[in-house]
Image (cartoon, rainbow, N blue to C red):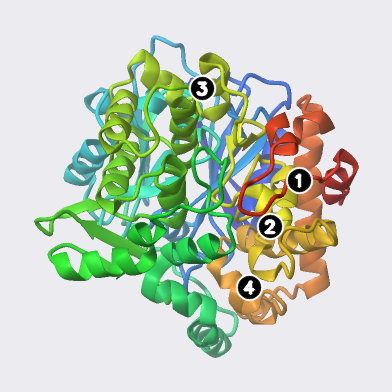
Amino acid sequence: MFSMLRIDTATGETKRENFDTKEYLLGGRTLSSRLVSQEVPAICDPFGKYNKLFFCNGVLAGTTVSSSDRLSIGAKSPLTGGIKESNAGGIVGTRMALQGLRCIVLEGAPAENDGWKVIVIGRDKVEISDGEFLAGKGVYEKSELLVEKFGKKAGCITIGPAAEKLLLASGIACSDPHGVCSRYAGRGGLGGVMASKKVIGMVILADGEVKPDFVDPEAFKAGSKQIVQLLKENPVSSLFTKYGTAAMVDICQSLKVLPTRNFTQGTLPGAEKINAQSMYDIIKERGGDGKTQHACMNPCAIQCSNVYPDKDGKLLCSPIEYETMALMGSNLCIENLDVIAEMNRIANDAGVDTLDVGAAIGVAMEAGLAEFGDEKAVIELMEEVRNITPLGRILASGCKVAAKVLGVRHVPHILGQALPAYEPRGTKGMAMTYLSNPMGADHTFGFTLRDEDDPTSKEGKVELSKKFQVIGSRMDAMGMCNFVRYSVRDDMTPLLDLIKARYDVEISASEFDDFVKETLRIEHQFNTDAGITAQDYRFTETFYEETQPETGEKIDITDEESAQARQW
């Protein structure tokens, strides 16, 4: 039996419902996308009363299985206009599981002049209290105030000033194991959706006592150990344990797909200054609060996160991920990790997605608002975002909006969502994935780069992208960290055996994949019903007209081919 807590943000009414279907068993994206499809009108205003915000954990949340407590947040996206699932680490998924919850839904919408609210969920209560004490403050200060009031062990969720203003690149910040709201469901503008419900914070207390009830405890214990062993033996997850996702800087530089100068180039001359080894060395040298390994959730055998210190060894930002290093680093021709870390910190405090805002700044630079590589200028532009100035509002609305306002044609986005950190003309597999994602350009959805024999050729990339769309969606379905996919991508048996040992429910690999593919069909159908057409799944025309200098490639994928990659 799985429980969902409904909270009507207009009336304050709460209701707990119980379910026993397989979509609730799996949870994660399979659940959030189904609920969005079933309960949210596709044509609704994303900031209106008919949109709903779903917080879903996964099938193994609250257990000893490594990397199994991620949180899927789903709604209609104000950024893309379609369905959205945004994913975060941290401790919220665990706290939900210990309260016996598979899903929390925020529905309805208060009057615009209603005050901000904080929702507190505990073992014996759901309270909706005044949240005005958080209004206008940055996420770090909000996080401190929530910890002061509810304790470091509580699972806290909050939004930044950008979300309070309903800006399209705003995200939702979740508590990490140290009580800091730094784990972001950053993409899709879902922070604005939470703000439209006048909910400025949500707290899941650490008083939950719903412990996992294992059908076969010994088999589950052995299976949990097997997952750790598989992660340790896999060379990719082992690489991330030492260097984190920053290891991708050198990989993408060598493949000539490191986005540079507003996605007009694929290599950065000084890439070695912002690569994984440089970051590792800086963290080691500065010491203090710095950590080269750090877990965003417990338990986690990968620990790919990091804590980046300033020159005095004090915490500057945690974490710096590859996607941020590229979109706020190489994409802007910034070759200084301290500058990237400061931009990242400001983005976290303002509550905005580093990818969408990094891409928007790249567009602003192309428009002549600053020179590429100007370290002072990029910090000033981020301060505009934090201070919600008119220019800051434009940048915090993502690169598509920024380009329209500033008059720029070369814009790295699909469905309004900024491209992740892989220049699409040099990796046609990733390009195909961008063009077929129901949620806008996304790298976790179908990551092909490591398996492309010839990245510049489009041959076979429909099939390759679809293969990895399924592999990535498996992890989203179960609430697992996406990096677990490297250890179980060709054999889901270890994870499916854990489900059997936990719930006594047997799911075959083929049945599970059918479930995942049905989720993809549901997502694409929602977008069609929302008015998104095949013509919306295109890069801007410049990607088809202009060659990437390092590879001599243009986008040559046809609309028919990308449509094939969206057929399930």
Give the x, y percent position of residue 236. Answer: 53, 76
- First of labels 2, 4 by sequence position: 2
Count neighbours of disc 2 (C-alpha within 10 A) and say few if under 14, some if 14 to 19, many if 20 or more: many
Q: Secondary structure at mark 2?
A: loop
Outermost left residue: 312
Q: Nearer the viewer, residue 556 or 172?
A: 556
Mark 1 against mark 3, which lies toward the viewer?
Answer: 3
Residue at position x 47%, y 65% in the image: 250
- First of labels 4, 1 by sequence position: 1
Q: Nearer the viewer, residue 556 or 474?
A: 556
Count neighbours of disc 3 (C-alpha within 10 A) and say few if under 14, some if 14 to 19, many if 20 or more: many
Q: Which residue is mark 4?
A: 503
Give the x, y percent position of residue 35. Answer: 68, 41
Q: Which residue is mark 2?
A: 446
State which quadrant residue 380 falls in.
top left
Q: Is residue 1 visible?
A: no
